[in-house]
Amino acid sequence: MNRTPSAGMDPARFVDALIENPVGVLSADLPAASTDQALFVQRLGRHGPRLVDLFLTLYKDRADARKWLKRLFTIMAESWDRRSDDLRTLDRAREADPSWFQSEKMVGGVLYVDLFSDNLANLFEHIAYFKELDLTYLHLMPIFSVPHGDSDGGYAVSSYRAVNADLGTMKELTELARVLRGEGISLVLDFVFNHTSNEHEWARRARAGDPVYQGFYHTFADRTLPDQYERHLREIFPTVRRGNFSWDAQMRRWVWTTFNSFQWDLNYANPAVFCAMAEEMLYLANAGVEVLRLDAVAFIWKEMGTTCENLSGAHDIIQAFNAVARIAAPSLLFKSEAIVHPDQVLSYVAPEECPLSYNPMLMALIWEAAATRETRLLEHAVKKRERLPEGCSWVNYLRCHDDIGWTFDDEDARQLGIDPAAHRRFLNAFYTGNHPGSFARGVPFQYNPDTGDLRVSGTLASLAGLEQALDADDPVLIQMAVRRIMMMRSIMLSVGGIPLIYIGDEWGMLNDYTYLSDPAKVSDSRWVHRSRKKWHLQRSYSDPAALEWRFFNGLKEMIGLRKNLPALRNGGMEPFWTGNPHLFAYLRQAEGQQLLIVANFSEHGQVVSRDRLSGFPRESVFFDHIGKTHHPATADLALAPYQYMWLEVKDVR
Ligand code: GLC
């Protein structure tokens, strides 16, 4: 057999060679890629051996593993055939510049299409709005067809190929992706791959009794196995349903449902599921999606006797999907959504797994520091756990569509003399308005009476004190809330990674309590921070007396600054200990530029004593890009309440 793939070689024969002897392919000379087919074969040669290895490891106990592997290669080849010229051009550009997403020019936004513009057709009219904010990354919350009524905000997908008819069509989505790309904005969508809705075609067939499709899910005739699994599992949505399994009356079987009972967990131990989902993933990539947010990554692999979270099988599955993408849709990038222990969050981040990841620890600890006015835990944790592998980036956010959970490491807290359980209780009380003197208006989410666990819902502005201040009509409190919000934003935009704006926060959206009168939403407090875009407020963006103006223009200005400071490109941050427990500071450095960022988390003025700055040359001058002022390195640095500075260190010798 010819083991050296040549440009003219039939991919099917090449695949046989690859499965037979991946190492042989790896050591062979790959063809110069003069045609698109040769390029595909070349990518197969580069990433195929890894894929074969992962697949055959995952499915080592399955006699039909090779059959499914071949099916997977067929899926990739067919999908590549269908990929548009535009996207193939993008593939080449991204391969030539794999760190494109690490640029300081990257700024993201995320929104619900229905709440923002009613539907996809109207969204086209708002591209100018995204351009005004200078976004380069737009995440649309799930827009595919879902069951009527409660669909967990779209996270119960009934088809990965049909846009929810209320929102539009696949054709509009593809067109939107193309138009956005032309404007320099990458389209980001969710890949809700841990589960489908119970109305997905596969689930319907399973319920009708088809054993092939029952094998797509984890189904059980009785409680024997579920009870055994249950001993080690957490509960994610304990207020809507206890346990992790739901009885389906039509199928007359129990089915694994980590989240809601209408969200059926897929069974990735079945290679047919892997292949079917790879096909759906490539379909989305060919529609022009550039980044996929991999939803609920922690839960995709199950093993008896374990917590069924963050298992090595989950990593193998994602890495195998990643290899599929590298071969058949190379520009597709993965972002992981793992809201788990910080070390587990890190475990998903790698160029060959998810090069992008949400940064839930930083998010939670910014809120923690806002409540305590102390930055010790934030500083300590960031020092230990913020560093990512080369070629990867954080996605930094203050709020998103989900709740806030206090994901810090217990040992980090103990090392600082903080009792982690008591501290979480304090934070929950603080953010749900049960702590005297708290500025926050949050709403409890998913209280678990057995464990005492609680998370918090609410918008950035309401949690940061604006709602309460406006109700009290207190100008000083309003001022503090505004400054607090701006200060928190300044960290999101400068700390390293892609800042992600939860659309609505750009103008200071407050909590919206109307969900309480909607039966499909009332039991899920996250709807308090998922509200309709109030377009009439846009008028206020041009009225300097309006708060909306301050929020919107303040953000625009900060984004503009970020984009002109090469030190803010990705490349890590070094925490800088100021000696003042109310300040959070770090150094950013790139392309010969050095920035010292300092943020004051308290409502009182604070000082960085000059001794702390002695590491900088005596002749240095700090230029604050925010306040446009100069500060000598030899003097104390004074910050007003909630002030933040982006200080460029200039050696003026
Ligand atoms: C993710 C989503 C969340 C959803 C869950 C189940 O965590 O962010 O909104 O409820 O997955 O799909």
Image (cartoon, helix red, strand yellow):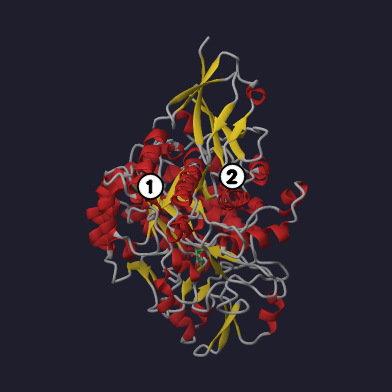
Say what secondary structure mark 2 lies in. Answer: helix
Question: Residue 551, labelled with which disc?
Answer: 1
Q: Is residue 425 left or right of residue 28?
A: right
Q: Is residue 248 left or right of residue 220?
A: left
Kindly give the residue lying farthest to the top in the view shown: 653
Which-is-in-front pick, marks 1 and 2? 1
Q: How many marks?
A: 2
Q: Which one is nearer the viewer's eye here, 355 or 41?
A: 355
Q: Which one is nearer the viewer's eye here, 164 or 605?
A: 605
Amino acid tagged 2: Val
Crowd tier of the residue under label 1, counting other residues whose Cα lies within 10 Å: few below 14, some 14–19, many 20 or above: many
Residue at 59 percent of width and 40 percent of height: 389
Residue highlighted by disc 2: 23
Question: Residue 588, labelled with which disc?
Answer: none
Amino acid tagged 1: Phe
Residue 300 drawn at (x, y percent) = 57, 64
Residue 81 drawn at (x, y percent) = 33, 53
Marks 1 and 2, the one that precedes in the sequence: 2
Residue 80 drawn at (x, y percent) = 36, 52
Can residue 14 be seen at all in this image of the molecule?
Answer: no
Residue at 59 percent of width and 21 percent of height: 635
Say what secondary structure mark 1 lies in. Answer: helix
- Relative to 201, residue 385 above or below: above
Residue 623 drawn at (x, y percent) = 47, 23
Quarter of the image for residue 610 reads: top right
**Cα–Cα span, label 1 and label 2:** 56 Å
Residue at 56 percent of width and 75 percent of height: 257
- Relative to 595, residue 520 above or below: below
- Relative to 481, residue 262 above or below: below
Residue at 55 percent of width and 17 percent of height: 620
Can residue 567 be seen at all in this image of the molecule?
Answer: yes
